[in-house]
Amino acid sequence: MSEIGLPLSEFELASERLKSVLHHTELDLSATFSGMTGGRIYLKCENRQKTGSFKIRGASNKLAAMVERGERKPVVASSAGNHAQGVACAARKFGVPATIVMPRTAPIAKVQATEGYGAKVVLAGSCYDEAYAEACRICEAENAAFLHPYNDPEVIAGQGTLGLEILSDLPYADVIVVPAGGGGLLAGVANAVKLVNPRIRVIGVQAEGASAIAQSFKAGERICTPSTATIADGIAVGAPGDLTVPIINRFADDVVTVSDNEIANAILLLMERCKQIVEPSGAASVAAVLSGKLDVKDKRVVCLLSGGNIDVSFIQTIIERGLVARHRRLKFTARLADRPGSLVQLLNHIAASRANVLAVEHDKLRTGLDPNETTVRVVCEVGGEEHGEAVVQTLRDNGYLLEVEEV
């Protein structure tokens, strides 16, 4: 490895190693997102990769390199999920025992999938950093090799093969948008792409609640955050790599952030319009484009869908967030006279406005109510922001006092 960055030969070697291991995932032109943004938006569907994410690239390249050097001792990794599955799958292929330490908060589906690849799973701590500490302890106790999820040159090279794949399929791309957590994927893709075609802009995307790399890029030096808070667990990293950050700062063109609501909206649109199941971290690239954080008009833009391992039990929460973000949910509280027929009258006005009532909650004990009053909290399904505003105006025109919950 050079002082900052890897030579192109490392990415080319990684590509050769991985030919028999990976799927060459498709690059899909989205007519929907192109129409919404004015650019030509392509989706790099790494959510359909083996193990459901890009992480198998770095893990497989690292293990292949170790085997080539004659290093066949057991391996240990710490991960919230996708790196765990990548290491487990790669270890099985190369015949190496693997132990994966995952936070106790890791989605059950990811734990079970990791065990399904034959790895031993140890649950420890409530976050990645605590799981990492336990993994280091196991490594020392068992004389095993630690496979870092992002802060390793051979892992970075493996992730960077995605950049070479994109260029082979779309050599005239203008922009590549890449989710970033610890920075291995963004560092690898930016490094590889810029060595082949410096004209192409590579943009990283982080969640607003886990923005260490965005802050590091702005400051020009590595910055760690004391905590993270985002639905995008795959990129919820407070301490990016001391190898990845300098590479990103050298080769990436920008790093932007998106809100959890913007991510949820992107997931919902990917489901509805593209029939793609994408986890929150994987949808961050689409969220950045759809929210206007990037100038994509008249440009060929590749959004990297980095993973699809979303917990089924979490999908309903994501859908609800997405519907709220798109103003498809209207939530308000109305003050009514506490007498028979008042609620029916309110619901009839809502029905006449073509809104669909999903939930109604009475509250007669709210502070400030007269003895003959009650409040009703209503959740409606509406067709969008304009429809929701029209429903509210209709109710107010009919004399109702409303408190509308902000999105």
Image (cartoon, grey):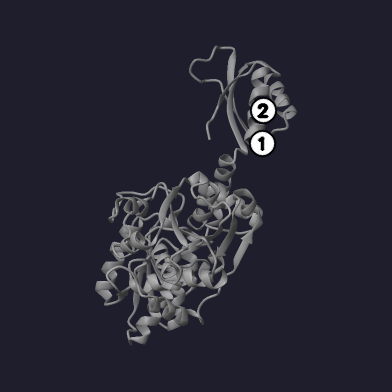
Q: Is residue 188 left or right of residue 144?
A: right
Task: Indicate the quadrant where residue 140 lies.
Answer: bottom left
Question: Which residue is the site of mark 2?
Answer: 391
CA separation, marks 1 and 2?
A: 9 Å
Q: Amino acid type of disc 2?
A: Val
Please tell me which residue is depicted at 32% across the width and 60% down the height of the picture.
245
Residue 7 vs residue 304, the one in the foreground: 7
Q: Is residue 402 left or right of residue 56?
A: right
Please say whether residue 86 is visible from this viewpoint: no
Please tell me which residue is depicted at 58% across the width and 28% down the height of the picture.
332
Picture coordinates of residue 346, whole percent (x, y)? 68, 23
Q: Is 393 above or below relative to 307?
A: above
Please say whether residue 11 is visible from this viewpoint: yes
Picture coordinates of residue 35, whole percent (x, y)? 64, 51
Q: Is the C-beta separation of discs 1 and 2 under 8 Å?
A: yes
Question: Which residue is the site of mark 1?
Answer: 382
Quadrant containing the N terminus is bottom left
Q: Amino acid type of disc 1?
A: Val
Q: Secondary structure at mark 2?
A: helix
